[in-house]
Image (cartoon, grey):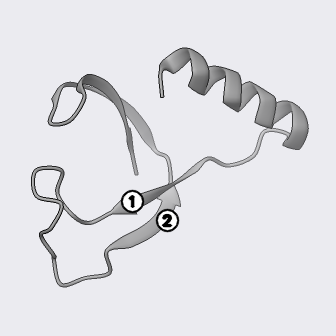
Amino acid sequence: MKIDRLIEELRRIREAHGNIEVTCTVSTMPDQDPNMTCGIPNVYETTVENLIVAEQHPRHGKAVRLWA
């Protein structure tokens, strides 16, 4: 999702539901090897804590990453 669409979606949600918490679903599997297992639950949900620009994201090149 591009930044413009993310902002548009967040504004729409804020208008409908107020200034609510933003969470994200997180996978414990590394980006480089989606078949790798880590011996812990594969997916969990947490709040978004930081936005960081990843200059060389393994799948998307330059991208904003939500950090939990």
Q: Residue furthest right?
A: 16
In percent of width and height, residue 67 lies at 37, 44
Query: Label 1 neighbourhood size at 10 Å, few (<14), some (14-19), many (20+)?
Result: some
Please give the name of the residue rendered at 47% of the width and 21% of the height, measured from the top-left corner.
Answer: 2
Residue 4's mark? none
Q: As displayed, is residue 47 above or below residue 5?
A: below
How many numbered dots are placed on residues in this image?
2
Mark 2–mark 1 Cα distance, whole angstroms, equals 6 Å
Q: Residue furthest front?
A: 35
Label 2 close to label 1 by CB (< 8 Å)? yes
Residue 45 is labelled as 2
Q: Position of residue 45 (x, y in %)?
A: 49, 65
Q: Is residue 7 left or right of residue 38?
A: right
Choose top left, top right, bottom left or bottom right for residue 11.
top right
Q: Determine the residue located farthest toward the bottom in the rendered image.
A: 39
The image quadrant that residue 18 belongs to is: top right
User: Which residue does the image show at 79% across and 29% down from the upper left?
Assistant: 12
The mark nearer the N terminus, 2 or 1, is 1
Q: Which x, y percent locates residue 48?
A: 49, 47
* Three-letter residue code for mark 2: Glu
| Residue name at image x 33 percent, y 63 percent | 27
The residue pinned by badge 1 equals 26
Picture layout, residue 62 above or below residue 20: above
Q: Quadrant of residue 41?
A: bottom left
- Under mark 1, the amino acid is Val
Residue visible at 40% across and 51% down?
68
Residue 17: x %, y % from top left: 86, 43
Q: Is residue 52 above or below residue 2?
A: below
For the residue labelled by badge 1, is the local secondary structure a helix, a strand or a loop?
strand
Instruction: Provide the secondary structure element on which disc 2 rests.
Output: strand
- Pointer 2: residues within 10 angstroms few (<14), some, or many (20+)? few
